Image: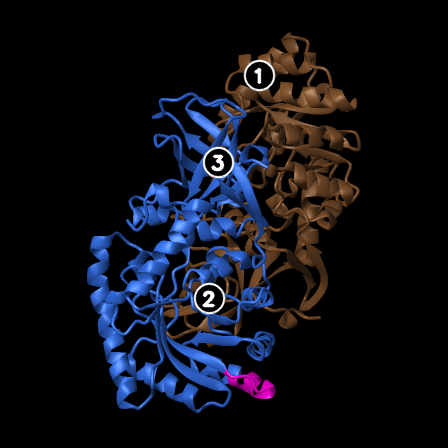
Chain colours: A blue, B brown
Amino acid sequence: MFIADLETPAVVVDLDVLERNLWRMAEYCRSHDLRLRPHTKSHKIPELAKRQLAHSAQGITVAKIGEAEVMLQAGVTDILIAYPIIGRGKAEKLAELATRANITVSLDSVAVAQAIAAEAQKTDARIGILVELDVGFHRCGVTTEDEVLSVARVVSDLPGLDFKGLMFFPGHLQVPEKERADLRATVNDFLGRSLAKLEDAGLPVETVSGGSTPTAREGHLFTGVNEIRPGMYIFNDRNMIGVGVADLEDCALSVITTVVSTSVPGRAIVDAGSKTFSSDTHQVQDGSGYGLVKTDPDADVERLSEEHGNLNIRRSTREYRVGERLAIIPNHVCSTVNMHNQIYGVRGERVETIWEVAGRGKVQ
Amino acid sequence: MFIADLETPAVVVDLDVLERNLWRMAEYCRSHDLRLRPHTKSHKIPELAKRQLAHSAQGITVAKIGEAEVMLQAGVTDILIAYPIIGRGKAEKLAELATRANITVSLDSVAVAQAIAAEAQKTDARIGILVELDVGFHRCGVTTEDEVLSVARVVSDLPGLDFKGLMFFPGHLQVPEKERADLRATVNDFLGRSLAKLEDAGLPVETVSGGSTPTAREGHLFTGVNEIRPGMYIFNDRNMIGVGVADLEDCALSVITTVVSTSVPGRAIVDAGSKTFSSDTHQVQDGSGYGLVKTDPDADVERLSEEHGNLNIRRSTREYRVGERLAIIPNHVCSTVNMHNQIYGVRGERVETIWEVAGRGKVQ
């Protein structure tokens, strides 16, 4: 089967580019003695998690219990659920998973630690815990070194839990490179103070988990970090080009679309909208646009309806005609893949493999 | 089962409100002698399409072939696919569906008409065609009355196709009421000129299909319109409140979430982000915010990550605690439902039914 045989819209992944992306991240981690624990939220595909494990990853990261379950079923046995697990059904399931695999969870409150410990005790499972720090993104995470110590102490004392170390997500560092250095200094300050506090208290820290693709190759510049959790690097996208950590040729994933209308002057409409790309905006520059048309840098994916991509082609020098196909690189691969039940691995024009997005749409 | 038993995030629909929404739209259409053909992209659930048919709808609208197929399997036999069908696989499937149901398609080009006719001929199916007009949204649709006539003539002459009339989508009228009236005048002008042109040419127009929820109850104010295609009215959402066509109590759908972190001062984090709500923005006012917290109008759903909803609670007067549940009304119901494999119909606190979102994730 060839790309031309696929019904559109179709999400295709260039396997040569994907393999180069995997190899480069593995090389970086090896050269800086960092453990690699890729965030599989970017694909939710067990076969791709296994490729990451074959490329130096020592375990994986997921966002949900249901994703962990899918990965475990496929034979992945070292999983960080980078999310505070709360709710009795979830904690029960977590404890059950921990009897079958090496499971770690991040959290930032005593309430979550206690709830998890209560279920862990019933199964004799041991669950690893990373205490999450808010290093400036202002989402989850404790905000002072005293809180780090106080949550770590509770975790250390609770039955069923093993305090493993610290985790942070530097989401606010998804900015161009020159802005990242200043922000990193503040992150390092908080990390340094927290690690000192834990050392004084005699609490050993096995892991300091940093990450995200924009900061991945700066992992060695963060205080104490010995593990990173990049996700998007496997595919890359328009945002990663925007923050300067990928070039167009590093983008493995694109959406094959068909032009369905050229009736309105200055417009070409493709059969892929927000239910294909997601409506995630561009995270840099002025935030405009929903993708890059690979063969026409002058076309602007200006607006998305649910099933229509609305291209402004006024600046374009080429003709557009109904029925032709366009490959478009999305703003944000994680959200795009999540819209689809299956995506395609291609080599040149040939479709080499079909992957089920097995981890998508999980209730918990 | 009760709402409290559902794992979060969970999309729940208040059946009493849904039934009132269905009844009101049916009443409006009856009183103005308009045919109702709801757009089922808002739910993609056959059981809900059937409820709409039981509430005066004379057929349904879908956006994709795959959605039409799901609805037809469930016994719905009068379907408008409001999308230009292009591509041989799709046209083949369309022709096959048309042998089993009353199928109409919208289009705005001779290329699409010819491709559909070529496949229709092979099956002896007859496919109804509505010529789409661009009334100002600048997406699909021909832009002059001369083009309307020219496409309609080609359609009338092609074997396998029946020219049925006109269709338009007034997406640019998703604005507050006072702005809609002016825009409507321009729409009516184009509709009037097009209808006159077709009449002069002796081409009978059976249907003029307008629609969308924001303009639904103004359907009778559009020149020649005898059918409307609202979608969101079945649930309503924050955008529909924003444009003034629904009140909070008309919103049938909400997402039940759990607070997973309160570590960062002024923030409460819930377990529902862009992979639960979609990242569709608010279409009115300053565009900020991703939902309405039902029990706390002072909380601002300020930012979404993939699995985190980041609430700014600085203006809030209540306490937030980890583990508590919050019901949140999304900006845009169509995109929210599309993220989920199943949603729940509830009456009071009781879960009365589970619906599979059977039409989501279709390839074509």
What is the chain identity of the residue bearing mark 1? B
Query: Which residue is disc 2 drawn over?
Result: A60
Indicate whether B244 appears above or below B324: above
Q: Looking at this view, is A362 or B200 the one in front?
A: A362
Residue B285, numbered label: none
Q: Is residue A119 in the magenta section? A: yes
Determine the image quadrant of residue B26: top right
- Highlighted magenta segment, given as a residue range: A117-126
Q: Is residue A260 in the magenta section? A: no
Determine the image quadrant of residue B283: top left
> Are the numbered discs 3 and 1 placed on the same chain, yes or no?
no
- In the rendered image, residue A140, in percent from the top left (x then y), is placed at 39, 70
Residue B148, numbered label: 1
First reached walking from the N terminus: tag 3 or tag 2: 2
Q: Are marks 3 and 2 in contact (CB under 8 Å)?
A: no
- Of the 4 image quadrants, the one containing the N terminus of chain A is top right
Query: Which residue is disc 3 drawn over?
Result: A309
Q: Find numbered disc 1 in the image and state the secondary structure of the residue it sits on.
A: helix
